[in-house]
Image: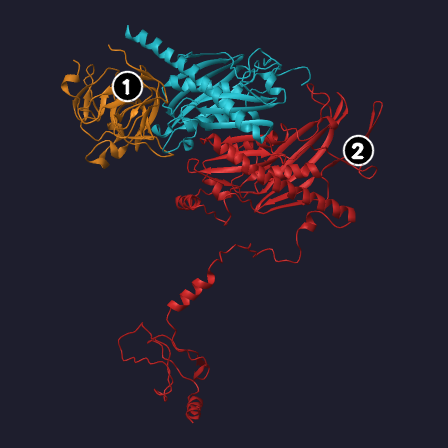
Chain colours: A orange, B cyan, C red
Amino acid sequence: MSPMKLCVPGERLCSTEDCIPGNGTYLRHGSIFASLAGYVLRKNEGEELPVISVVRETEAQLLPDVGAIVTCKVTSINPRFAKVHILYVGSTPLKDRFRGTIRREDVRATEKDKVETYKSFRPGDIVLAKVISLGDVQSNYLLTTAENELGVVVAHSEAGAQMVPISWCEMQCPRTHAKEFRKVARVQPEYLQA
Amino acid sequence: MAGLELLSDQGYRLDGRKATELRKVQARTSVFAQADGSAYLEQGNTKALAVVYGPHETRGSRSKSLHDRAVINCQFSMATFSTAERKRRPHGDRKSSEMSLHLKQTFEAAVLTELYPRSQIDIYVKILQADGGNYSACVNAATLALVDAGIPMRDYVCACTAGFVEDTPLADLCHAEESGGGTSLALALLPRSGNIALLQMDARLHQDHLDALIEAAMTACKGLSKVLDDVVRQHLEEVSVLTRD
Amino acid sequence: MRDTPLSNCERRFLLKAIEEKKRLDGRQTYDYRNIKITFGTDYGCCIVELGRTRVLCQVSCELVPPKDSRPTEGIMFFNLELSPMASPAFEPNRQSELLVMLNRQLERCLRNSKCIDTESLCVVSGEKVWQIRVDVHVLNHDGNLMDAASIAAISALSHFRRPDVAIQGRDITVFSPEERDPIPLSIYHMPICVSFAFFLQGSYLLVDPCEQEERVKDGLLVIAMNKHREICSIQSSGGIMLLKDQVLRCSKIASVKVSEITELINKALENDKKIRKEGGKFGFAESMPKERITTLKREEAPVEMADVKETANEIVNRTETPTEVVSSPVLVAMGTAQVGEGIVNSWGLDEDEEDEPQTEDTKTDDVMVISDSEEEEVVILNEEAQKSTKLSKRK
């Protein structure tokens, strides 16, 4: 590997005419400055200008942003909403859990008023959801599972075994063969393990 | 003040330094594993430890969070064994509250807080041994900790104290020089742009000497920033060597 | 209770005005508001009014054992309180950031600058010294509390007289004011704080910000100086980025302002001394003017009268002349008269209303009914009398 250049916060990397600022940089007076301590990476996007960014070994804390797909664990349910702890943003694990809420009307895309949270999630389920809002002063992150690919991915039955999805609204326990209602995510077959 | 000559005839100070010489600075980053960023800094005999957590969700009352940027929460405290007399109240008294407030304002100006809306960054600084220049050591240690945590900043924030004795500006005061009753100026600077983030001065100084004093403090800060720069680069190289192999 | 937040339009308006170098009360960038210093009947009590900001300061003293590290020096204790009467934002017993900042700045400005000779406060070395306590209370908050507090503190300290003491061996006798005249404190110099508020990332600065200007400021720089051009303390807060020449420029402005204010304080002290000597009445009650309507009071607002005459003439020439006005009242009916002409009634329903307002030609027989209500029937009283008056008029 060719030795990459080290940079520290406040160091001038180049001017705005040469590159587009990427992650870990900021603009000031027509020049691009580094804002993190790490290695300078220049990537050619194929467009006019390359993107210049600063990378670190340990990624800095990512915050869930609007539109990001997050993996969360259900902590409590309520006839109106379900409270979750956000564990992963995309594929990066978070060091700290963030709190989120999935409202009853955001569980499904169709027939929103006929949703029962007890039949969609249970505490302890791992759910794939999308962030719709950062929330205001009172509330936490608002999430939605109103898409085919979003919903419960891993759930345990009342007997304690990991359940297998049967349809978009049911899962079956392999031990007791009892069916339970969940809002199931349609995961691509190649990601499913036997 | 009798008997203590802050500046001898040959130009030597109490600890043998020249007027514009800084004390020896040693620093290490990533001293704590569980914190997001940490640093330990020694400036002469003053020892400071800084720990950074964040950015994370606003703890406590959610009403404190700002909708468009991160809130920086600073706490400054001195260990009870840090001064000659045992400190009875390490934090919560007015001086510590004021220092915490100044640290918070200094870093709010330097950190790019717009990238982290509705979250909180915690900075905890503790002085383990106080020998003059408490505030400066805190700022320098906190800068290193923030860089270590990967929080984007505009520039380093370097701080240093300066004093004035017999028409000569002194850089980097120790405790005896500070409490001797002469002037002492604490300055926090962003070295590349030359912007002063914080300026604090006590005791009397004639207006005409102000220029020279600020100049001396700024030069001292720039020298200090080089030292911090070296520490950060060295740490980066060490880490990269470990992860490459 | 929390203070009402500043709306976005107010904020924008203030910032835009500052860009155009205009202030809400018409001051210039470097102007102070009116400062008024009054002293109370007791020594060491003073009220300072900076515009509408009002601050009260009281100095008192007592004998205490000294600090171990400094056995031959007296003790100075400063305390500033934000009273809830000053602003709805101040709650009692709440340690807010503003309180901490003001207290520390006051302490730094007065204690570290050694404006008072503490060695003279020593009575018996190592056993008894005077502790001077300075209490500042904010009575009304209209911006720039720091300056007002520092002026009040230093004026009160200059005004204060401590009781005289006599030492005989180990006995200390403190004389009351009647027995022996109290002694003033020995003050070396008078440090006064000047506040500079920065706006729009440090491009604009204002001296002595009022409350609304304080809310939109980016940061504050407080410089404490005395009239000998010695800087006693500098403190920048608010996280603004300053340049060195900005600081130097501010210090130059501060030196000018401080000398003006010091003169004001000295004059006030002189006045008070003179009045007391002459036996006249003094104190707060005297300083408030009596027999004056204090409510409904408006301060004089300066109005730009530069080319009033030319502008007025222009306006007069441009407008058209008004129509002829009949000034004498026209008696329409008994009990009603008309002065001037009304405009044609445009509420009109499209009936035959040839509303030619009263001229003696039309409709002399009937009484002109000047009402456009169709529902009510207007009953005309005293028809004979009207008819007779109409006939008489015609003649």
Residue C269: x and y in percent read 70, 43
Q: Residue at x 37, y 71 (%)?
A: C320
Q: Residue C164, which numbered label?
A: 2
Quadrant of the drawing holding the C terminus of chain C: bottom left
* Image-quadrant location for residue B143: top left
Foreground of the two, C245 or A190: C245
Residue C103: x and y in percent read 58, 32
Q: Is residue A144 above or below residue B45?
A: below
Q: Residues within 10 Å of mark 1 (few under 14, many from 20)?
A: few
* Image-quadrant location for residue C261: top right
Q: Residue at x 51, y 15 (%)?
A: B22
Relative placement, left or right, of A64 versus B86 is: left
Q: Residue at x 56, y 39 (%)?
A: C145
* Image-quadrant location for residue C251: top right
Q: Tag 1, which chain? A: A
Foreground of the two, B28 or A155: B28
Label 2 and label 1: CA atoms lie apart by 76 Å
Helix, strand or loop at label 2? It is: loop
> Can see residue B135?
no
Which residue in the structure is indicated by mark 1?
A: A92
**What residue occupies the far left of the structure in this picture?**
A189
Q: Which amino acid does the dot numbered 2 rest on?
A: Asp
Q: Say how many tags the image has.
A: 2
> Can see residue C21?
yes
